[in-house]
Amino acid sequence: MLTNQPLGPNQVTGAPLPRPDRSAAIQVYVPEIAKGLAITMGRFLKNTKEMALSQRNDPTIESISGGINCVSYPEQRRPYPERFRGVHRLTHRTDGSPRCVACLCCSTACPAQCIHIEAGEYPEGDPRRGYERFPARFVIDELRCVFCGFCVEACPCDAIRMDTGIHAAPYDSREQFIYEKDMLMSFKGRDGSQESENPRHEPGDPTHPGIDREHGH
Amino acid sequence: MTFGTLFVLSLIKAFAVVVGLSLNIAGVLTWVDRRQGAILQDRVGPERAVVWIPRRIAQGAVLGPAVLAAVGALALFFFKDAEGAARTTRAVGFSHLAIFVTWFTALLIAGRVRVRGVKSSFDAFIASVGDPRHIFYFGLGAHLLVLGLLAALAGTPAGETARDFLYGAGPFVFAFSALFGAAYAAQRFQHERAGFRLIGMLHPAADGLKTIFKEDFIPPGGDRFLHKIAPFISFFPVLVLLGVVPIGDTLCFGSDEQGRIAFTKLLETVPRDGICPTSVLGTGAPVHAVRLQVLDLNVGILFFFAMAGTGVVGAALAGWASNNKYSLLGGLRAAGQMVSYEVTLGLTLIGALMIYGTVRIDEMVRWQAENAWGIFVQPVAFVLFFAAAIAETKRIPFDLPEGESELVAGYFTEYSGMKFAMFFFSEYVAIVTLAGLTTAVFLGGWHLPFLHRDGIHMAIGDTVIFSQPLTHLTVVLLGVLGFVGKTVALCVLQLFIRWTLPRFRYDQLMKLGWRKLLPAALVNVLVTGLVVLAIQSASVEVQRFMGVLGQLTHLVVAVAGLVGLVLFVRFLLSRAEHQRVLASTSAQFAAAAGGTQTSRMGA
């Protein structure tokens, strides 16, 4: 309840704050300035010395200790965790073609709608015609991408991955962020591989279940 | 001296002082103030501005000077023999230079190897030394060994041999170390281009370039002419102010057959007393004195006040011509503040003028060299003068004319592009100017303790402690270095004050100026007058005692400088103590992955 009654002396609780010391030494002001300067100088000299003599602490490890704590990107980088989601790549088959079968699962799953796929049919007579398609165009707008990794989860063929370890690069125009299929296929995984460990079951392989568009279950 | 010679000489001096000293230091100060101030707050300021240099050119830039120095040293050894005292000087000089270059190069390489890891067999050898401090200790030991050996064996045949050995070995070791260090650095350029960053100092240069191309805005209702001319009015005075400050001792030149000044005939040595001898020893040819100050005015420091007084006009005009209430308020504040503090600035100097008995700044410096530095005879005036000088530069804690929290940007709110940059930069030039003047009036100008016109002579009263004659050129160069060093130190002190102190309130500023600094300055004048009167009427013994006291102050300065140097080296050698704090899971992961990954940019 609000009242306009002033608080009486009995109602005040707690110790009063001490008044700032107003001694002559402080009123003269110069010694206090000297003290302040000493603190500033000490800090400046220490940090400058540690930077010049390469004695800086490691900013990514000692993130709350004293001294300069900043990473001079791009000369210095954080180590990325194993499952860090970097720029996408399209994995290869053994013949160098993309594993992607243009099923549109990834572009459907994408919350940012940054994946655009144009599916292409294999030519007449190719054993894969009628069994699967291939991406005639596979475009990712890296500027729209939110790096959620849903496309990787959605892919039934392990064809799209985000294990390049590449930090999304800064460019100076929007066109440069549109990654086409060739570019996506040129990236390597962090282990240097472009293929996937998971085997594929091509038509004609002994492991192939023999299912295609004409011959169903 | 003819008018033509005088004109060219003045032009050279003006260029050296304005561009070489004032603008250069101001440029570096801009960088230090705006960028390196971040270091206080445990950040690195922006330092990314870079010029890419092709690898071959970068290698040439590293190797070229080293090759030149090495060839020069060897040529001196093979083609220009020295005998007698000069031989000893050269042996000592070259051996210490060689030792210094050797340990310093090794130290640099060791530091780099520690950062980026062992890459070659030489890296492995350097790394096997362990702590890079060992290299410094080793170098220090070598210096002391050479010094001690020469001192112990002086005058004996063994000493002759040692000197001859050092005389021969010095240039070769120097050449080898310089070439090896440069070659090592050159082969480290492994990418096609090398980034030239100049420890981030290109950043203000880039900023400065940028302002040239930015829009030059003139407010529609403003006074176009005054708006255009105001930055020049505020920039010009601070540039010319340093003209009356001598940056070094007077140079003495000989003359040619017609008795005109000959710039190739710099006197070898000059006597300790007086400025220059009247004639060259032996030939009797006249000696020409060249003062190392642009304007040789006999009103000296009065010119300083005349020009400093016009500085207020620029700020006030800028505020008026902008047609903006914030600008106007800023301009009025600037005018009020600068006029108030100029009174203190002038009155603090009255005490100094009473003691020095002159308004010529070079004569003030000579008085300080003979007796004691101004900071010892006028300590109160020094503090008051320095405070008023900071107020004159309109910088924190006195930066109310441009107080961002109240006035947007004060009197230059409506300025953009290069005109804004001129206001901005004139502040930094003013720092250099006032630091230079403070140095000359209170810190002995070009004078270094016990450095006389003819060499280093350490004496207290009649007791001579140490004596080493030096050439005229060396003495003057040391003096110029001393002046620049003191000026830079005062500039840096002003930056630290800016980084440390909060801004005053305007009424506090006025109270400080009129009710504290001004009475203090008046009392200082009164007390100074009484003391000067007392000393002048005192007996000869008291005056002799005052002379010894003056020499003791020089000793204090010298010892303080030495102690400061030792403390600084100790500070550099101290270990950095960091606690490894793995506070977060990401820090734990980073530690497991080896910490921050460093790579060279520029591929």
Image (cartoon, coloured by chain):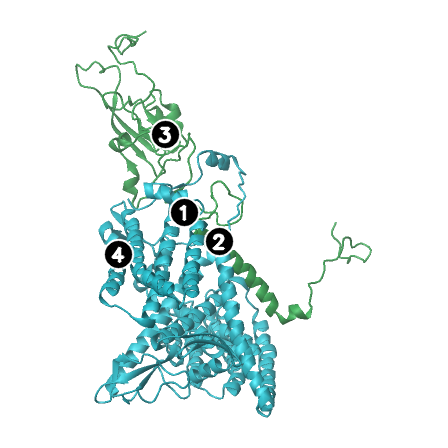
Chain colours: A green, B cyan
The percent coordinates of residue B131 (x first, y second) are 45, 46
Are discs 2 and 3 both within one chain?
no
- According to the image, label 3 marks what residue? A163
Identify which amino acid the numbered label 2 is placed on.
Answer: Leu
Disc 2 and disc 3 in contact, CB within 8 angstroms: no
Q: Callout 4: helix, strand or loop?
A: helix
Q: Are marks 1 and 3 in contact (CB under 8 Å)?
A: no
Expressed as whole percent of the image width and height from the top left, the position of residue B336 reads: 51, 77
Along the line of sight, which residue is nearer the eye, B178 or B593? B178
Quadrant of the rendered image containing residue B140: bottom left
Instruction: Identify the subunit bearing mark 2.
Output: B
Q: CA distance from mark 2 to mark 3?
A: 44 Å
Which residue is at the far bottom?
Answer: B537
Judged from the image, the secondary structure of the residue bearing numbered disc 1 is: loop
Q: Nearer the viewer, mark 1 or mark 2?
A: 2
Residue B386 horizontal/vertical position (percent): 51, 74
Q: Quadrant of the C terminus of chain B?
A: top left
Same chain for mark 1 and mark 2? The answer is no
Q: Residues within 10 Å of mark 2 (few under 14, many from 20)?
A: some
Q: Residues within 10 Å of mark 1 (few under 14, many from 20)?
A: some
- The numbered disc on residue B61 is 4
* Disc number lying in front (1 or 4): 4
Residue B381 appears in view: no
Chain letter, disc 4 residue: B
- Mark seen at residue B573: 2
Whether labels 3 and 4 share one chain: no
Where does label 1 land, which residue? A72
